[in-house]
Image (spheres, grey):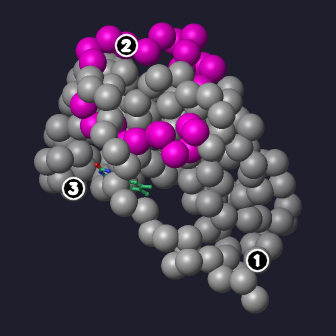
Amino acid sequence: MEAIKVIKERRSVRKFKEEKVSREVINEIVAAAAYAPSWKNTQITRYTIVEDEAVKAKIADECVLDFVYNAKTIKRAPHLVVVTAVLGRSGFEKDGSYTTPKEDRWQNFDTGIATQTFCLAAADKGVGTVILGIFDDDKVAEAIGLEEGQQVHALVAMGYPEIEPGAAPPRKEVEELVRFI
Ligand SMILES: Cc1cc2nc3c(=O)[nH]c(=O)nc-3n(C[C@H](O)[C@H](O)[C@H](O)COP(=O)(O)O)c2cc1C
């Protein structure tokens, strides 16, 4: 698929078929996401693919700040991707000091770019995704046994779409988004 086409046709998918995405396809999506740019090429983004129903149910029932909509989406998805960041590299100097006034917020920037690249690569392969932001980082970290030195940045529910996603929700006009000076 052409880049512009996949960018425009990717939709958030919240209802999935039961069929699992193969390990091979998931690895190809992660390999593509690895090409996302990152702070000094630090490549801090990691992906935990949750397929275990008990772990998925725990996240849905106990880690989404009682936001039922997300709990339902997670339960319907054959895979839940937990996007995590290796801390202390992106935005930092070697001596541990911050490089810019944005301090450690470049970490979120990097995982954000990587997550969108992941979702675009998935869309290219016919795999549906939705980024979920409403969750409790620490509870999710505990549920997946996240290693020390990493932090949960996003959840992505993933699977083959149950129905063809509809038209994109409306986007702002270019004039509202851009300013030339
Ligand atoms: C940072 C972020 C957090 C989001 N959190 C949620 C969420 O908690 N639950 C949900 O159903 N969708 C969530 N979304 C998906 C957005 O609602 C969706 O991208 C937006 O409505 C545009 O629709 P589209 O992705 O189909 O173009 C999130 C998206 C982003 C980028």
Query: Regarding mark 2 in the picture, which secondary structure is present there?
Result: loop
Task: In the rendered view, tell whether residue 178 sits above or below residue 49.
Answer: below
Task: In the rendered view, tell whether residue 134 sits above or below residue 8.
Answer: below
Q: Residue at x 19, y 41 (%)?
A: 71
Q: Which residue is mark 3?
A: 65
Kindly identify the amino acid type of the residue bearing the numbered disc 1. Answer: Thr
Kindly identify the amino acid type of the residue bearing the numbered disc 3. Answer: Leu
Query: Mark 1 to mark 2: distance in Å?
Result: 42 Å
Tell me, for residue 100, which label it has, or none: 1
Q: Residue at x 43, y 15 (%)?
A: 21
> Residue 17, percent across and down?
27, 18
Query: Mark 3 to mark 2: distance in Å?
Result: 27 Å
The residues colored magenta run: 5-29
Q: Using a 10 Å C-alpha cutoff, classify the residue at mark 1 as few (fewer than 14 neighbours), some (14 to 19) or many (20 or more).
A: few
Choose top left, top right, bottom left or bottom right for residue 91: bottom right
* Residue nearest the viewer, comparing 115 with 176: 176
Kindly identify the amino acid type of the residue bearing the numbered disc 2. Answer: Lys
Is residue 56 rendered to the left or right of residue 92? left
Badge 1 or badge 2: first in the primary sequence: 2
> Residue 122, percent across and down?
52, 29
Q: Residue at x 56, y 28 (%)?
A: 124
Q: Which residue is mark 2?
A: 20
Quadrant that contains the N terminus: top right
